[in-house]
Amino acid sequence: AQTVTQSQPEMSVQEAETVTLSCTYDTSESDYYLFWYKQPPGRQMILVIRQEAYKQQNATENRFSVNFQKAAKSFSLKISDSQLGDAAMYFCAYIAGGTSYGKLTFGQGTILTVHP
Amino acid sequence: DAMVIQNPRYQVTQFGKPVTLSCSQTLNHNVMYWYQQKSSQAPKLLFHYYDKDFNNEADTPDNFQSRRPNTSFCFLDIRSPGLGDAAMYLCATSRVVAGGQDTQYFGPGTRLTVL
């Protein structure tokens, strides 16, 4: 079974600084997709960034970028120029390829606090 | 804007009293999912529909059922809620993408309290 591990229950960062959230996963599949979702307190979960395992290039979305190390099964999220609105629970998630839809397996989440 | 809508946002029920949670989507996605998220935990998939085909996770209790009368709506029925069923229930949708995986789009959730 696939597992996703986020080893940092909580992280904090100063506004305008950079922070990296860690995620490791375990799978025997070669075709899969990885996601970072953000869940602000009391609000809905939204996609931050996604990475296809077959792509060697790391995904980026504005201030958000990932460091995808396929051999190490590591998928960290870097947030640059942190803003107060970045404060949220961040979930790393995995889904196997091979089918056109399926179950997301989530990590336990990392609570990010942004200090002004 | 296209979106996933859940009603109600907050639901209080009594122990053993049936409750239904609602999800609707304007995205016209084939697949709809129900996840359970307990406090400070990761979401856990309960079941999903691909069009009208229902797929139950092996460890989803029999107490939980779902209906999808049409593409836009999906319901989660809890027949006899127990205290352990208090949680946030998240609905999500995705398209079927040939040879790939679409992103799942989540609704705001319904927080269920069981008294």
Image (cartoon, coloured by chain):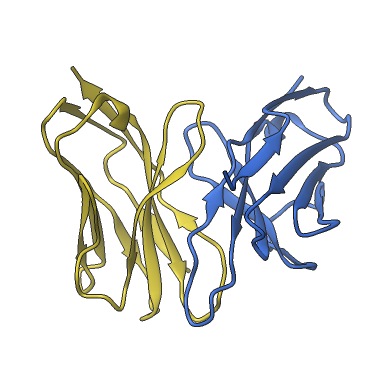
Chain colours: A yellow, B blue
* Residue at x-position 88% and y-position 34%: B18
Question: How many marks overall?
Answer: 0
The N terminus of chain B: image quadrant: top right
Query: Closer to the camera, A79 or A30?
Result: A79
Q: Could you say which quadrant of the image residue B89 lies in?
A: top right
Q: Quadrant of residue A2?
A: bottom left
Locate residue B40 relative to residue B23 in the image: left or right.
left
**Residue A99 vertical position relative to residue B113 in the rendered view, above or below:** below
Q: Nearer the viewer, residue A19 or A28?
A: A19
Residue positioned 82% across, 44% down in the render: B77
Q: Residue furthest front?
A: B1
State the quadrant of the C terminus of chain B: top right
Q: Position of residue B42 (x, y in %)?
A: 48, 44
Is A1 left or right of B8, judged from the image as shown?
A: left
Q: Give the quadrant of residue B78.
A: top right
Decide if residue B11 is on the left or right side of residue A83. right
Residue B57 appears at what percent x and percent y?
67, 62
What residue do we see at 67% from left, 65% from top?
Answer: B30
Q: Where residue A40 sits: x, y (%)?
A: 42, 31
* Extreme-left residue of the structure: A17
- Is A76 on the left-hand or right-hand side of A101? left
In this rendering, the answer to whether A96 lies above or below A87 is: below
- At 20% from the left and 68% from the top, the residue drawn is A72
Give coordinates of residue A87: x percent, y percent: 31, 29
